[in-house]
Amino acid sequence: MPCEIITLQLGQCGNQIGFEFWKKLCLEHGVNPEGQLESFAKEGVDRKDVFFYQADDEHYIPRAVLLDLEPRVINTILTSRYSKLYNPENVYLSQDGGGAGNNWAAGYGRGTGLHEEIFDIIDREAEGSDSLEGFVLCHSIAGGTGSGLGSYLLEKLTDRFPKKLIQTYSVFPNQDEISDVVVQPYNSLLTLRRLTQSADCVVVLDNTALNRIAVDRLHIENPSFAQINSLVSTIMSVSTATLRYPSYMNNDLIGLISPLIPTPRLHFLMTGYTPLSSEQEATSIRKTTVLDVMRRLLQPKNMMVSTAHDRNAQQRYISILNIIQGEVDPGQVHKSLQRIRERKLANFITWSPASIQVALSRKSPYIQTPHRVSGLMLANHTNISSLFKNALKQYDKLRKREAFLDQFRREEIFAENLNELDESRDVVQDLVEEYEAATKSDYLQWGLNKLTQGQ
């Protein structure tokens, strides 16, 4: 039974990574840019209906909703080779095209006004699904549309579809560069609150780490957005591979994320991918084995989140899922897991049975890859809290000086007071404390105490 997933792409960043994701899916499933099945593509080897549906003339249409408050990026998509792929009724562009001006409050406020039009599209897509499993949201947390309108949609989706899963691919800003968005710390914190309270699973895509990987590992001096987005689309396509090439396990979204998330708020996942190779490096192919891939996935330099260095080895893995693609013998997987356990390469929590889970996934038969085995790690690790601490630190610097708040006060949600900002700070601070508590053996007792205090 297909468990369909609707992809929502918001803002400039969300639409750019969404576009790369659909290009990748089309290649993997043998679908051409017009949505027609290529002559070499065979039926029955994959499940296209999770992410696509078929029109009356049999061509494939993505279950995607494209939303933006300014037209530039969506117009680029609609004038590309893939313009005929999308359902034009699923593209929503704001009439005045003014955008949210990189302001969370403006994006959120516009969401209130556009509620009916946006949910007409989402409801139509949901009703066209046989058994909708959930939504995947692509957005950035630092700008205006992806963060503000994204936050509004997260809240409303939870109310409207309470039993459906909401997974997000959330792009965190690059900390190594000085941002031209002065209110980025406010935007990030307000969005983090919604990601904590309304999403079931957040895959963190950290621009700092993605840039570092592009420079250090792929030897690209000044990585372009397209090159970074290509990395992101690889993560997105491999993390959904077991849904599209199903086997006996991990073949629906709940089966994929439930082993990774033991308690509701600890749902922020890091990713790692190996082997990485760019077009220029196609000549330097090395031998890949399952142990080699699984060992490399645990190395910090392959992690796509830039977390603080863990000097005292306090931080721990809560759970790990490795999706291994390629020619793999299950016996090799078992041996590799034993070797990793013997060498204590991963430091796990003590309050719950935890280990590395492995999902073996088929590769697309239509794409030739230079490596025999490749792997993606989805990991729930307590060190991700350093990303949130950084967001709090940046926020506190601005808030202390009451800097740039006039832009926010103009919007209805902040017209009377700035409580929304203070409440968001409390939610993110609580999240940091919960991740810190999860490193200790008495975390479950800590959680019970917290519950009883809250009652």
Image (tube, rainbow, N blue to C red):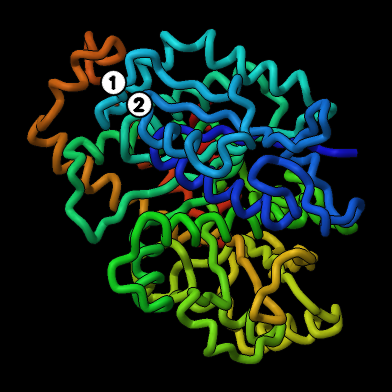
Residue at horizontal 75%, vertical 53%? 29
In the rendered image, which quarter is residue 100 located in? Answer: top left
In terms of secondary structure, where does tag 2 sit? Answer: loop
Q: Is residue 371 above or below residue 314?
A: below
Q: Nearer the viewer, residue 394 or 10?
A: 10
Mark 1 and mark 2 residues within 8 Å of each other at the beta carbon? yes
Mark 1 surroundings: few (<14), some (14-19) or many (≥20) residues within 10 A: few
Name the residue: 64% across, 37% down.
Answer: 85
* Crowd band around label 2 with a 10 angstrom C-alpha radius: few (<14), some (14–19), many (20+): many
Which mark, residue 70?
2
Tell me the SS state at disc 1: loop
Residue type, numbered disc 2? Glu
Count of residue discs = 2
Q: Toward the viewer: 306 or 40? A: 40
Identified at 64% across, 64% down, the residue is 320
Of the numbered discs 1 and 2, the one sitting upstream in the chain is: 2
Quarter of the image containing the N terminus? top right
Residue 335: image tag: none
Q: Is residue 223 left or right of residue 352?
A: left
Question: Which image quadrant: the C terminus?
Answer: top right
**Rendering coords of residue 441 (x, y %):** 56, 61
Place of residue 339 in the rendered image (x, y in percent of width and height, measured from the top left): 70, 88
Q: Which residue is mark 1?
A: 98
Residue at x-position 22% and y-position 41%: 395
Q: Position of residue 293 (x, y in %)?
A: 64, 80
160 with respect to 453 (left or right):
right
Q: Please state which of residues 27 and 404 is positioned toward the viewer in this rendering.
A: 27
Q: CA gap, disc 1 to disc 2? A: 6 Å
